[in-house]
Amino acid sequence: MVSKKKRQKKSQLPFRLNILFLIVFLLFSALVLQLGVVQILNGEAFQAEIDRTTNDYSETPVPRGKMFDRNGELIVGNDAGYSITYTPEKGIQAGERLDVAERLAEYVDMDSEEHLDGITERNRQEYWYLNNTDEAENLLSDQEKEDMDNGEQYNEILDRIDEDKIDDYSKQELEVMAIKKEMDKAMTLTPQVIKNEDVTPEEFARVSAHLGELPGVNATTDWNREYPYDETFRDFAGSITSESQGIPADQEDYYLTRGYSRNDRVGNSGLEEQYEGVLRGRKEKIQYTTDKNGAIVDSDIVVEGQRGKDLVLTVDMELQKKVDEVIHDEMQSAIQNQPHENRNLENAMAVVMDPTTGEILAASGQRYDHEKGEFTKTGTSTIYNANAPGSSVKGATMLAGYQSGVIEFGQQFYDTPIKIKDTPEKSSWKNLQWVNDLEALEQSSNVYMFYIAMRMAGEYNYEPNKSINIDYAAFDEIRNYFGQFGLGVSTGVDFPYESTGYKGSNPDAGNLLDLAIGQYDTYTTLQLAQYVSTIANDGYRVRPHFMKEIRNPVPHEEGLGPVYKSHNTEVMNRIQMSDSEIDRVQEGFHRVFQAPEGTASSHFGDKPYDAAGKTGTAEYDVYEDGQLKASTENLAHIGYAPYDDPEVAYALIVPHVGKGDNSEINHEIGKGILDAYFELENEDEGEED
Amino acid sequence: MQNRINIDYTILSILILLGLSSIFTLYTLEPTLSASDGSGYWLKQGMWYIAGGLVIVAVMTIDYDRFHQITWILYGLGLLSLFMLFVGFPPGIVTEINGAVSWFQFPGMSIQPGEFIKVILVMTLAHVIVRHNSKYVEKTFKSDLGLLVKIIALSLPPMFFLVKQPDLGGFLVLAAIAGSMILVSGIRWRILFFLLFVSLAAVSLVTAIWYFFPDSVAAFLDKSGLDHVAGRFIGWLNPQETNGGYGYQLITAMMAIGSGQLFGKGNIQVSVPEQHTDMIFTAVAEQFGFIGSSIVVTLLFLLIYRLIYIAIQSNDDYGSYLVTGMVGMFAYQIFQNIGMSIQLLPITGLPLPFISYGGSSTLTYMLAIAIVLNVHSRTKEYMFETRWKN
């Protein structure tokens, strides 16, 4: 019995072992199942992950495209500077970097004050630590090491290095520290400049010859913008960011999605910004294949580098210089002759363009600082600043009058002051009595324009000292006509920003009349230039532009490469008025410059070139805290020449000229511009002969 | 028949195949191990296998029945060595490696008592179960309970020392050994089920507490010096978030294993920390693919199958218990080691038996196999008794 019982008990053992086997079987099945999932189902994804993390890219910048003027003169170039860079491999240790720095110090001088003064106590401590690691480690007791993590230990050791230990370093050692300091700034696989100022050709050659023993070091050329014409046209050319500024933070996404790196230099104003995509070039892209330890096993040029394309601009730098000079000289003499009268005269601006193509030949601005007595060039104010141009807009007013049918050729009005009830009297510069449309332009009749404006607003029965009935839609109607000439709307210029001027927001009868004589809304100089060009160009409004051609770069050569793209003349619109109506206004403009009674004829009547145009004076007083401070005027001038076949048009404006000024500065500048233009043309022709 | 040594050639063959796999894998790893890891592991591993072979021969000469006599001495020595590690005596010989105090460092070699204690625990529990069952022939609920208490009481001290090293992996292996031996010890099902239920309830409770009060649990773990345990769980559940820490090893391990795909790629692209020891399976899987890794898993499974067969065949309870303990040790260790590298389990420090490089571990497993072979060779074949039919 006993033995049988015992055997029964014992029989439980195989059964339980079988349960154990079942458990083991299930566990191993789970292993094989999960192995299948990881290796067969997801294997490709893991392999892709490995491939992704073992390819790295490095990009080498290329020189930026240059800018030339229309005659091929260099405006913005590149000053090639040699540069020594360092590109760390993955996982490189501080000690290895020090080795490289020591070897590099034999070939490169880092003894400029900037470099040597930049060495901090910390740099010295780190240098000492790397050279005396064993001794340094003994500065901490084992107990202290146990209590601190690695970073704390390192900092504590550095702190405990005696000052006299790191005080007495030779110049050579200090240079090593300076190099190491620059190298430590580098991020993995990203080139860091070690030295790029005053690298001599000898240094460049020495480093180039020893690149083999300097892992990660490279000798390259770096580029800085140079401006042979100095400040002339500089603000139009614009600027680029420095390497430390990199791409603008507020447009980071824009640039990053276009393949830029964060420390790339990009155009951030002017034409550098406008044509960034053309000028930037294509960076050389190198693919590094790294193994799992971070060592580079292979490198391939994936994208061949190409320097940026060059811009040929429409400006003529000789003309630009002369226009700058004319404005400068005229402002200076006006201010010198009547310093008190012209105490608010601070700016003058002019744009010269080809009216048939829209090519901007010169754009010039001067600003005078009365306190410092200094002039600065502010050419872009021709695009950024808007002013009321006065009577120079009358050509547009007249054409609006024809087009809307409120006047016809030869229409006469009696020019005597207009007095609307409860408003100030408004008049021309003198009482011109009976004038027709041509005489109204020639002698600049304000009253004639008032009648056009009143009629466009539906008021045909003006009587002195009575209120008038006007339809305020006339504001929009007149602005709509003006807009066809480019006044108050975008000119379409190829520049990152342009002002379209200020539109008055107070529609009453007096303001409507002022609008018609250019004393209400404000316009930029460029808008005025487009307006006069449109009249000169028989009603075709062309887009003004700075870019004439884009040229492909010529490798390793100065000069211009083949044309990649050129800017064709672009007609934005044809004004609605008929050819005969435009001819009539052209004739009026011609009489301004040539007829005995013309407001500008005394200046232009006897010139060898046959010019036409319009003068303008807008009352534009200076107020301060609501108090009248000075009575001043904006003096404007627009014109083109030759009359029969216009090849040059200009617009200029001088705001805040004293009312008692007698310099006629607008006439003088206008004359100076056309004189300069034709003088240069004759020179060119003379050369060609 | 009695005096002839009956060798189990199946186990020997499997052992030789596993040994060759180990040495070959270590050989292929040689160029990718960094200088700080050392070199020549494949050669050293070969030496350890030869030393292990000598251990087998030596152990085979002694009838395993005589192990009863040295059980308590071994258990005492094992606990003593663990205690010395715990108190850090003698200093200079007890050293910390990778943040754990698990080693006696002698010139030329180092010994890891945490490995040997596994076999010692198997021998101790087998001895205690046999003695208990022969004393209480008529089993009662009370006697079963008494046995359970004895097993747990003997397992807890070494488990405590291992946790303190800290060696979470070793702790879990000891738990697996105790668990498998409790299963076969003859304790009635009612108690076993209750035990299972209590364990499951405890696990669920801990999980729930952790889930609902993560901050206070973290504070508690931090205070009790067990924060690395929590770190491992977090690294297991969210490897990407803890890429710098525990997650890093898992991510690289998965990448290595996964990229091996079906046929393997014949070389190693991914560097996994501890690739010659605990993470050796990643080297097998990356180079030889699913097919290669399945072959290794199958070999290990066949080994355990054979062990269980021997346990069943043995007509001596003591022999069966000894082998069962080894089954628990191997099965759990294999499952844990491979499972942790494919995100089935959290990562713990454990070698893969017979494949991972390691002197103490290889010797321990060879010793375990020696005991199994010893049990097999002394199994008497009765012509007329088969236990299967009862």
Image: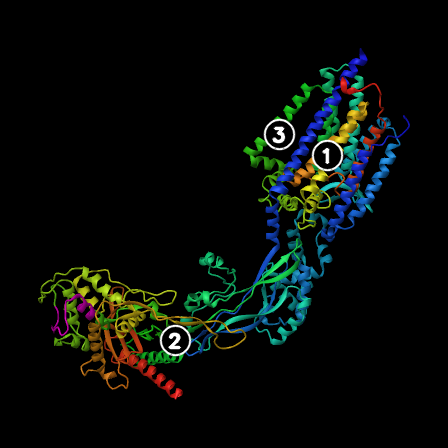
Closer-to-camera residue (B15/B83): B15
Work out which quarter of the rendered image holds the C terminus of chain A and state it.
Answer: bottom left
* Foreground of the two, A571 or A436: A571
- The residue at 79%/25% (across/down) is B313
Which residue, given by chain and number where applicable, does mark 3 sit on? Answer: B203
Within 10 Å of disc 1 (Cα), the crowding (few <14, some 14-19, many 20+) is some
Residue bearing the label numbered 1: B301
- Report if residue A617 lies within the magenta region: no
Q: Secondary structure at mark 1?
A: helix
Judging from the image, mark 1 belongs to the subunit labelled B
Residue A165 against residue A146 in the figure, above or below: below
Per the image, the residue denoted by label 2 is A315
At label 3, the amino acid type is: Val
Tell if the residue under mark 1 belongs to the same chain as the one under mark 2.
Answer: no
Name the outermost residue toward the top: A1
Alpha carbon distance from label 1 to label 3: 28 Å
Q: Chain of mark 3?
A: B
B269, A273: nearer the viewer? B269
Q: Is residue A399 magenta?
A: yes
Which residues, given as a range, are shown in magenta? A397-418
Question: Mark number for residue B326?
Answer: none
